[in-house]
Amino acid sequence: MSQDNEEAPVIEKEKPKKEQVEAPVVEKPKEEVKKVEPKPDQSTTDALANILNGPKSDGTSKGSEGNDRTPGDKGNPDGDPNATAYYGTGKGLDGDGNYQLGGRKALNKEKFVQDCNEAGIVVVNIEVDRSGKVTNATAGVRGSTNTARCLLEPARRAALATKFNPDDNAPAKQVGKIVYNFSLSE
């Protein structure tokens, strides 16, 4: 069925479009492209030269891996291959895991109060002589959880004030660490 009351849409005829004439494209003669071989930068060249022309090694040890001037590795053949020191066990004698100086005991354990509102763990690397005196202390090393200056300085001062038992068989400079745990209640 068809409807009587609706008109059909009117379709208009399209007007003819004017043709656009394109200008002819004049090709320019192509320049001859020279291929350039990529060259490595100077640092790469130097590194390769060092590898190829470096000193030859016969595989024998000429240096010392320890705390004396004798070539070769140190330690006990039956010792712990994961040990961090040549002397002692790496733990203190007093059973306190915070004072870690192989075969030595902390005779006094100084504490300095922090002057800020900070909390966290500060690890201090120490060097101790045979008499038990801490000769050098570096606070905020690996293992520290807070390296705020107001915690590092009291930890360093406390480490320098710590005294260990003397040991004539110890190395002239024995390395260890002290761990300080600062809390907000201090």
Image (cartoon, rainbow, N blue to C red):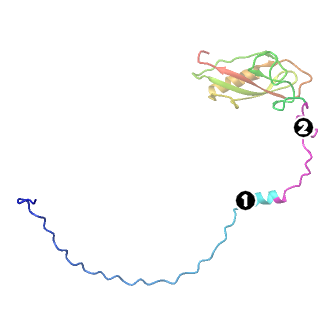
Tell me the distance, in whole angstroms, between the alpha carbons under discs 2 and 1: 34 Å
**Looking at this rendering, what residue extends furthest in the left direction?**
5
User: Is 12 left, or right, of 129 in this rendering?
Assistant: left
- Tell me the chief SS of the magenta region: loop
Quadrant location of residue 109?
A: top right
- Which of the pair 39/5 is nearer the observer? 5
Give the answer, above or below, for where 141 lies relative to 10: above
* Residue at 91% in and 35% down: 68
Q: Nearer the viewer, residue 180 or 163?
A: 180
Q: Amino acid at mark 1?
A: Thr
Where disc 2 sits, the SS reads: loop
Where residue 123 sits, quadrant-wise, is: top right
Q: Does residue 70 appear left or right of residue 40 in this picture?
A: right
With 1 as the anchor, is 59 left or right in this view? right
Residue bounds of the magenta highlight: 52-77
Residue identifier under label 2: 73
Query: Callout 2, which amino acid?
Result: Asp
Image coords of residue 154 (percent x, y): 68, 22
From the image, which quarter does the C terminus lie in?
A: top right
* 62 within the magenta span: yes
Q: Residue furthest right?
A: 70
Nearer-the-camera pick, 176 or 109: 176
The total of numbered circles placed on residues is 2
Q: Residue at x 15, y 69 (%)?
A: 11
Q: Who comes first in sequence, dot 2 or dot 1? A: 1
User: Which numbered marker is on residue 44?
Assistant: 1
Where is residue 46, by image quadrant?
bottom right
Position in image of residue 144 (x %, y %): 67, 28
The stretch drawn in magenta includes residue 56? yes
